[in-house]
Image: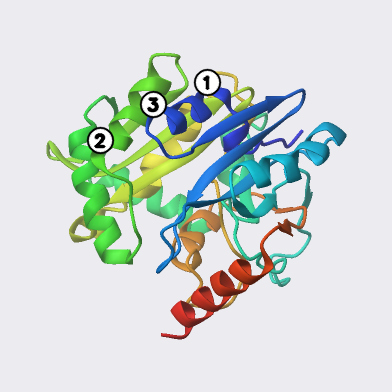
């Protein structure tokens, strides 16, 4: 049975966000939480925020306007974890919300399948690339060396033009989950040189591919494919039921921020999940309009 969860529903990740001041406050309710994120507006000295919740219970519904007033929230995001399986990957993805902390689509693997079945279900090119990595003696090992991983992550962010968290944050994120057996760093090596890495997190019955990086100058060795396969096999050996690639898009827009990485993730040929439509509740309409204008101008330029 396919299952997954919203990463921010994990109390240990919420504690890390609070410890590193990534969120201002977390309010816990039965079966749900409300998280408060800081929001800075240019030319406005006053501090604002936005709220996020993953489960709109009646208690949460009653508390949202109260907390919005208390924290000067401009808007709230409702990010439910309910999903449906996409029947055709050529189908257009759901409409992108104004803001979403977790992508509206992901792809997962059912780890109840055997290794042979998982391999058979992959695109033939993916199986071939795993073999290529083995042929070139790429070695995958569990590691605790965040420094080496972060060096490759910086190379990846520059190459693919995306922002990354600080090394201090990644270190804190990993160490706090690792001591609870909820994270593992995997590194791929070519002749003792680290060429790719990924961090898996674990919650309930799901393993999540949370962070990944690769050195482009070693791309011909196909290390990321073997790296993923080893992480998948490790999660299966630990009796996890699902391997979640944490975010893809089936959009044909080459400028979509997930376009490049989605091509890689979708080659493992797991089902694509569409999450239930995100909802946005607006508490300060004028400021929300300014935020939408800012986002539109950024996209245009």
User: Is 212 or 119 nearer to us in this picture?
Assistant: 212
Left of 130 or right of it: where is 220?
Answer: left
N-terminal label among 2 and 1: 2
Find residue 107 and report its horizontal and vertical position in percent: 62, 50
Report the disc number at residue 184: 3
Above or below 248: residue 176: above
Find residue 182 and report its horizontal and vertical position in percent: 47, 21
User: Is 127 or 199 nearer to us in this picture?
Assistant: 199
Report the disc number at residue 124: none
The residue tagged 1 is 237
Neighbourhood count class around disc 2 (C-alpha, 10 Å): few under 14, some 14–19, many 20 upward: few
Judging from the image, what secondary structure is the residue with disc 2 in? Answer: helix
Find residue 246 and report its horizontal and vertical position in percent: 55, 46
State whether residue 215 appears in this view.
no
Q: Residue furthest right?
A: 58
Q: Which mark lies nearer to you, 2 or 1? A: 2
User: Disc 2 to disc 1, how far (Cα)?
Assistant: 31 Å
N-terminal label among 3 and 1: 3
Left of 11 or right of it: where is 145?
Answer: left
Judging from the image, what secondary structure is the residue with disc 1 in? Answer: helix
User: Is 5 or 36 nearer to us in this picture?
Assistant: 36
Q: Residue at x 18, y 38 (%)?
A: 148
User: Disc 2 to disc 3, how far (Cα)?
Assistant: 17 Å
N-terminal label among 2 and 3: 2
Q: Quadrant of residue 186?
A: top left
The residue tagged 2 is 168
Q: Residue furthest top?
A: 180
Q: Residue at x 77, y 23 (%)?
A: 30
- How many marks are shown on the rendered structure? 3
User: Is 58 or 276 nearer to us in this picture?
Assistant: 58
Quadrant (top left/top right/bottom left/bottom right) for the C terminus:
bottom left
Above or below 93: residue 126: above
């Amino acid at each position: 049975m396919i299952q997954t969860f919203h990463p921010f529903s994990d109390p240990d990740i919420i504690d890390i966000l609070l410890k590193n001041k990534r969120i201002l406050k977390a309010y816990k309710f039965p079966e749900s939480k409300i998280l408060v994120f800081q929001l800075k507006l240019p030319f406005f000295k006053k501090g604002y925020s936005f709220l996020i919740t993953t489960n709109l219970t009646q208690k949460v519904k009653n508390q949202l306007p109260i907390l919005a007033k208390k924290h000067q929230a401009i808007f709230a995001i409702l990010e439910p974890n309910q999903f449906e399986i996409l029947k055709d990957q050529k189908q257009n993805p759901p409409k992108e919300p104004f803001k979403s902390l977790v992508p509206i689509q992901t792809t997962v693997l059912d780890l109840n399948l055997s290794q042979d079945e998982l391999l058979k279900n992959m695109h033939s090119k993916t199986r071939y690339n795993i073999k290529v990595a083995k042929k070139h003696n790429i070695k995958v090992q569990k590691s605790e060396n965040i420094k080496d991983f972060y060096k490759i992550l910086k190379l990846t962010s520059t190459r693919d033009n995306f922002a990354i968290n600080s090394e201090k944050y990644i270190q804190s994120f990993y160490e706090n989950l690792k001591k609870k057996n909820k994270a593992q760093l995997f590194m791929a090596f070519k002749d003792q040189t680290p060429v790719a890495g990924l961090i898996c997190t674990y919650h309930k019955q799901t393993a999540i591919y949370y962070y990944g990086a690769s050195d482009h100058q070693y791309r011909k060795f196909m290390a990321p494919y073997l790296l993923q396969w080893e992480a998948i096999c490790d999660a299966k050996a630990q009796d996890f039921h699902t391997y979640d690639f944490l975010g893809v898009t089936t959009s044909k827009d080459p400028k979509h921020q997930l376009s490049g990485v989605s091509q890689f993730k979708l080659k493992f040929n797991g089902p694509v999940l569409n999450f239930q439509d995100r909802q946005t509740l607006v508490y300060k309409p004028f400021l929300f309009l300014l935020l939408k204008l800012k986002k539109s101008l950024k996209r245009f330029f």
